[in-house]
Amino acid sequence: MRHGQRTFPAPLAGVRVLDLSRLLPGGFLTALLADLGADVVKVEEPLQGDYSRWDQPRLGTESASSWVLNRNKRSLAVDLKQPQGVARFLRLAERAQVVVESFRPGVVDRLGVGYAAVAARNPAIVYASLSGYGSDGDMRDAAGHDINYIAYAGVLGMTGPAGGPPVPPGVQVGDVGGASVLGIGLLASLYRAALSGQGEHVEVAMYDVAMAWTSIHAGGAIAGGSRGEPAGMRLNGLLPCYGVYRCAGGGHISVGALEPKFWAAFCAGIGRPDLEARRNDPSARADVAAVVVLRTREEWVAEFAGRDACVAPVLDLAEALEHPLARQRHMVVDAEHPELGPTPNLGTPVRLGGAAAGPGRAPSRLGADTRDVIAELGVPESECASLRADGVVREASEAGAEAVAARR
């Protein structure tokens, strides 16, 4: 295993997480837990693995999505549709502190690895479930993705241009927001379990989190103000002091000059001090736009470099990853790719004692850690061989080859 040097002590060292989740939401959460030192064992189907492993584009033979989401994790390829696979999982759960799953409500119970089954073996377990619409209510069994959760929550209806159709956000608000909030609940329950010895089932619905994130906008709607239409509120494009403006050459700048002092600095920077009194006047947007479009994004960045005006360039994702700030904040770090050598990966946003985590361990291939994880249960090699022969578990070469064949 390739380990980088961490610049802060791993606070979750000794915590084992069994990760049953797939794709972005659960993967984002368990990547953060792994960054903080938890031993995250990614439990995957032998013939499929996490669906993110098949995403495009590729980094070598692995998907770029997997490279980012599966950093610092180990991979166990085990078939939970076979009784022996369930039995091995439950034995692992006896020694774990956390289980994370993101199936629709009821799926893990049907498989025999739900909270009740695990808690019967390990009462101290913190069992974290992330779903689209929660385990109760009329929508509990409905299929969905991020765009559906934020549509029901009123978030999607707030985005886009005035008079135009809603525009999906560039990042998955419900997915990543739901995962982050589940992490808060998980850590709170883990702390309580450490004190009392009693675990619990922690549940978060991505719809719930998207709804909660409407916060101040919801307050305004409850008070009878805006209904949350696109470009119709203070923070989504109504006011001239908070929005995005097109520059010469096609680039854009963002302006967040909500406070009078920032707006005054902005107006001075664009040579229009006469606009200071119109900070909350929607009609002033056209006047600002007419000035900003005369210069390029780079020229405006240079103009505002010495001004405290809350102005920033709108970067595309490639530019953001290459910007010096990403390296300075350790949000882009190099990790050792098994085929490509040192390769950029995302860092963790958590800082402990002012320090950041190092690049850590490269993602495991599907099933790469199966033998080690099963051996940690005290299972003799002869039994491991029997499990492999019966298709209950797979090691990296077996799982990879069979997965490729199954995809053809």
Image (cartoon, rainbow, N blue to C red):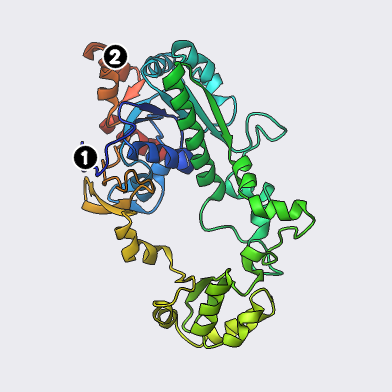
Q: Between residues 178 and 270, which one lies in front from this camera angle?
A: 270
Q: Which residue is mark 1?
A: 3
Q: Between residues 27 and 333, which one lies in front from this camera angle?
A: 333
Q: Residue at x 47, y 36 (%)?
A: 183
**Residue 80 shows up from this direction:** no
Tell me residue 33's x, y (percent). 38, 36
Tell me residue 124's x, y (percent). 45, 17
Tell me residue 256's x, y (percent). 54, 69
- Whole-number angstrom distance, CA of label 1 to CA of label 2: 31 Å
Q: Is residue 379 above or below residue 157?
A: above
Q: Residue furthest right?
A: 224
Q: Residues within 10 Å of mark 2 (few under 14, many from 20)?
A: few
In the drawing, does residue 156 fall left or right of residue 293? right
Q: Residue at x 31, y 65 (%)?
A: 324
Q: Which residue is mark 2?
A: 386
Q: Amino acid at mark 2?
A: Ser
Q: Is residue 147 above or below residue 300?
A: above
Q: Residue at x 38, y 42 (%)?
A: 53
Q: Residues within 10 Å of mark 1 (few under 14, many from 20)?
A: few
Find numbered disc 2 in the image and state the secondary structure of the residue it sits on: helix
